[in-house]
Image: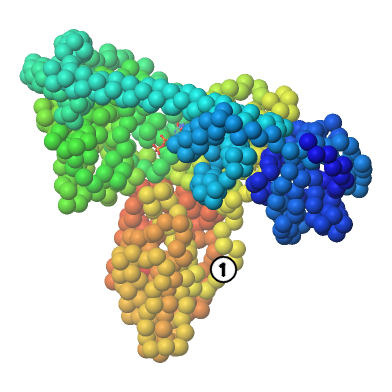
Amino acid sequence: MAENKLILPAIAVRGIVPLPNVDFRIEVGREMSVLALEQAERMYGSNIVLLIQKDPNDQDVKVDNIYPIAVLAKIQLKLKMPNGNYKVKFKVTDRVSVDNFESLNPYLVVSYTKLESELTNDEEEIALIRQVIETFSKDGRVYLQAPDEVARLLQQGLTTEETADVMAYYLKTNDKYKYLAELNVAKRLEYLLEDAAKERQIIEIENKINNDVKKSIDDSQKEYYLREKMRAIQNELGDKARQDEEVYELRKKILECKMPKNIEEKALKELERYSNTNNQMAESGIIRSYLDFLIALPWYKTTEDTTDLTAVEKALDKNHYGLTKVKERIVEYLAVKMMTGKNPSTILCFAGPPGVGKTSLAKSIADALGRHFIKQSLGGVRDESEIRGHRRTYVGALPGRILKGMKDAKTINPVFLLDEIDKMTSDYRGDPAAAMLEVLDPEQNANFSDNYLEEPYDLSQVLFITTANSLEDIPGPLRDRMEIIELSSYTEYEKFNIAFKHLLPKEIKNHGLKENELEIKDDAMLKIIQGYTREAGVRELDRLISSICRKTVKDILILHKEKTVITCDNLIDYLGKVRYFNNEGRETSQVGVVTGLAYTQFGGDTLDIEVMTYPGKGGLILTGKLGDVMKESAQAGLSYVKSHAESLGIKNVDFSSIDIHIHVPEGAVPKDGPSAGVTLITALVSALSNRPVPANIGMTGEITLRGSVLPIGGLREKSIAAVRTGLKKIYIPCDNERDLDEVPQEVKEKLQIVPVKNVSELLKQIF
Ligand code: ADP
């Protein structure tokens, strides 16, 4: 062993072990390493010692973290990279032992001794090198990181020592320091064979694990496959065991239902079919839903009716304020029913604007009689099959709304509310009204046919009640079957009472409050009615009271308030700003603007009609949402005015040189009907004769060409609306005088109602 004591700068490498005879490439970043590189290039002919760090994770170079054996190398290539580090290629020449650290700062300097490998070239060594080459050329890919590179190097012709170093350098194992530290080449060759064997073992274990995993996957696939096959076989056989039990249960249920004989037979037949149908098939599901439906439908179960009419009367009174006439008629209707023991030949129809208690009356009737209550809305129904259902041959076929309702009712004699019967329309898919006729006709409805059910169903014990907003929209033949009970708008006074007697106690209870925890002062309630609602019924009012209750609950829970008192002053905190300024009306009288009274399906309303003239060619312009009837009224009105101009006080007007513009502000709902006739004429005369019409008067009435005023409908609604908007006087057709007793007393007290016979009488009074 030659001993040359030498000194060189050094850098410590981490993670990989350089070996002689193989070029070594690393990235150098640590500042002291860079300095060492520079120093080596400048002072030592690019020679440098590469030390091997024991723990690659240690950032700092410590003496005791350096292996005693290192290599001597020559810097061949040094490239500066964008990140400031250097990529360096070293030619590694010798093993060295580190003798001493001469300096640690600012870079490492070590003294070292070159080491020579021990090479014998004896038979043992030759045998080993052969074995190594054989092993590695056979399974190179298994043991080596870059087998192709190794093959290339081997082809160049390497010595035994070089071969050992190259192989060791590219070996997959991590622990390579031993190849550096071992000077005996034969020993290093043995290491190679050992490591190869180890690697092979690892590979074998890995393969075994892979195979095991694969096998377990294969096994589960096999199991899955077999299960699928088993299921298919079971299906073929009808899955007897499971189905037998299901079929038994279904049969039991069918028999318990006490269906009429023919239907029971049909059900059992279907059941038979079901038990023979492969339950994977869609058919099976269809039959099953049909059977379930037959079982769920009530066939004989009834509730016992009360026979005590006074109790019914009391129940209606208890739940509803006012409506005296309505309740009377309901009781009469029920009396007939009780006397005859069957449903009267007509059906009750509650007609009126929303929120006036139609639904809740029907519900009260059910409660009072002790019957179940169900409701189906007919709004938007335009297809006969929605009433009668679809044939079962359709995918997703369903029974119609009537039988669906019956299913929910669970008894054969519920009170069945058909809501919004006026909102049914018909189209090419058939007329639902015709189907409804069958439902409602006591002569026919014992055998109501539904396409889904396929068999007649008995509706004769059902007490049908219908509701409608507007009578005109109910198909004629249906209307003929109905006993119509009209419910009209409530006056403020009625709303006030309903609120205190019904809505408030109901909402207090619904919100889990106690009576003494919430008080709404009288004037505050009135302000809610006048300033926050504008409706015929009391739905919005109900909602507002409910909203006050909600906030009260919050106050109690969060602020620990004991009692909430709602006054006019604090109302704004609960409901926000006032929304409507009723009872103020238009402030000043104006030329060409007149207030008319309208009757819509939402109750009464007022509308201002405006007329203006300007130079033109005798044209008539109509704007606003006017229906055809109203347009014609306008034409007729103008003709009347033209022909009576002189006597109406219209002077010096040349109709051929002016245009007349009539405008009806749209408002929330479209208005149509002939009753705006008088209003149109009055507005025309006012505009043409330049005389204002008082702001606080209103009027309603149809006109003929000759100026007669014809009667109108909805006087009660219109008068209530007039008071609501603050009118003081209204003109009505004298033929409507007989309807005056419909007008609530409190309205009469606030409103002067003047009947007129014809237009000239009306205009005389106004101007
Ligand atoms: P509709 O069916 O006419 O649209 P609802 O029956 O749904 O109206 O009535 C709305 C709410 O108003 C219900 O809570 C109902 O109890 C209440 N209501 C309506 N009229 C009265 C009344 N005369 N007395 C007591 N509560 C009423």
The quarter holding residue 333 reads: top left
Count of number-bearing discs: 1
The quarter holding residue 445 reads: top left
Horizontal and vertical percent for residue 474? 25, 46
Front position in the image: 640 or 559:
559
Q: Residues within 10 Å of mark 1 (few under 14, many from 20)?
A: some
Residue bearing the label numbered 1: 589
Horizontal and vertical percent for residue 472? 27, 50
| Residue that sits furthest to the front in the current view | 122
Amino acid tagged 1: Ser
Please say if 403 is above or below 646. above
Left or right of residue 691, residue 476 in this image: left
Structure colour scheme: rainbow
Write the residue at 32% across / 27% down.
Answer: 374
Camera sees residue 267:
no
Horizontal and vertical percent for residue 200? 49, 28
Front position in the image: 31 or 747:
31
Write the residue at 76% across / 45% down.
Answer: 72
The quarter holding residue 238 reads: top left
Write the residue at 19% across / 30% down.
Answer: 282
Left or right of residue 286, residue 214 in this image: right
Left or right of residue 336, residue 502 in this image: right
Front position in the image: 103 or 745:
103
Quadrant of the image where one finds ligand 1 = top left
Horizontal and vertical percent for residue 261? 8, 15
